Amino acid sequence: LKRVSFANDAGRTEATAEFTPKGQLAEIRCFSRPLLAPHANDAEWCAFNGKGPSNVTLYGSGERPRGLQSYEAGQLRKAEVLFPDGKLREQHEYTERGELRRVFFAGGVLHTESQLVKVTGSNGSESYPAQVKDFHESGKLVRERRWAAPTERGAVLALDQSWYMNGNPREKQEFITANGRTEERSTRYHDNGQLAFEGTYVVSERKTRLAA
């Protein structure tokens, strides 16, 4: 068996399971109830059996795992993507409010950590960034970005700051909006920590910067 799926009366696929040539699970897509029996055990994989969250291993063309997933009543709660050597490459945690996403270097050190928030509007649900942190392979934090609380129109960057490898601040940009006017407060530093530049700008609707 290579693939089994279930489609509703409108022809829309609602649940799917795919397998490797050796019969190992390669992909799983869950619905709000089990649909694939007796060909596939989505009742267990998607955690409809009342035993708590599931832990599902996904395989590639070889025998080594390429990812791990955890479901709860058909909802994906956790997902991991692995490098060919089995080390963690990506990690995703899902809640009703959004997602926590981590990406790792091949050596296992955290590369990027992102927090996404979900906004439900007239056109459905969209995910927007709330915070993103970038790390060097040494493990040191080198950049952080934060966004203001998103709306249906999107998310607006509120803070962008970075650091030198010695830990001293490198640059900081703050975006403050009040009374329909957005100001950018920019600060730059030398690698010894001394102030190099400081200024305030007015950001126009065309994203151009005018000295305040």
Image (cartoon, rainbow, N blue to C red):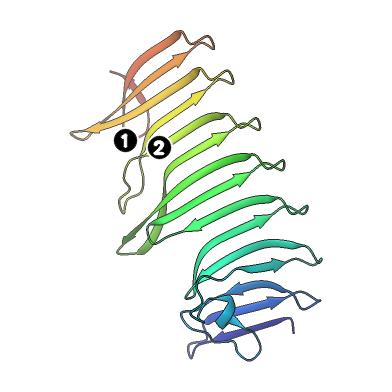
Q: Single out the mark in the foreground, 2 or 1.
A: 2
Q: Specify the quadrant of the image occupied by residue 183.
A: top left
Q: Position of residue 125 (x, y in %)?
A: 38, 62
Type of residue at label 2? Arg
Side of 3 relative to 156 (left or right): right
Residue at screen point 61% across, 32% down = 139
Q: Are marks 2 and 1 in contact (CB under 8 Å)?
A: no
Q: Position of residue 62 (x, y in %)?
A: 81, 66
Q: Give the labeled residue for mark 2.
A: 146
SS class of the residue under badge 1?
A: loop
SS class of the residue under badge 2?
A: strand
Between discs 2 and 1, the one toward the N terminus: 2
Q: Is residue 10 above or below residue 85?
A: below
Q: Is residue 33 above or below residue 62?
A: below
Depth check, front residue: 73 or 51: 51
Q: Is residue 174 above or below residue 17?
A: above
* Labels in figure, total: 2
Depth check, front residue: 134 or 123: 134
* Separation of marks 2 and 1 at Cα, in angstroms: 20 Å
Type of residue at label 1? Glu
Residue at screen point 66% across, 33% down = 137
Question: How many residues crowd mark 2 within 10 Å: few (<14), some (14–19), many (20+)?
Answer: many
Q: Position of residue 32 (x, y in %)?
A: 46, 79
Q: Give the labeled residue for mark 1.
A: 205
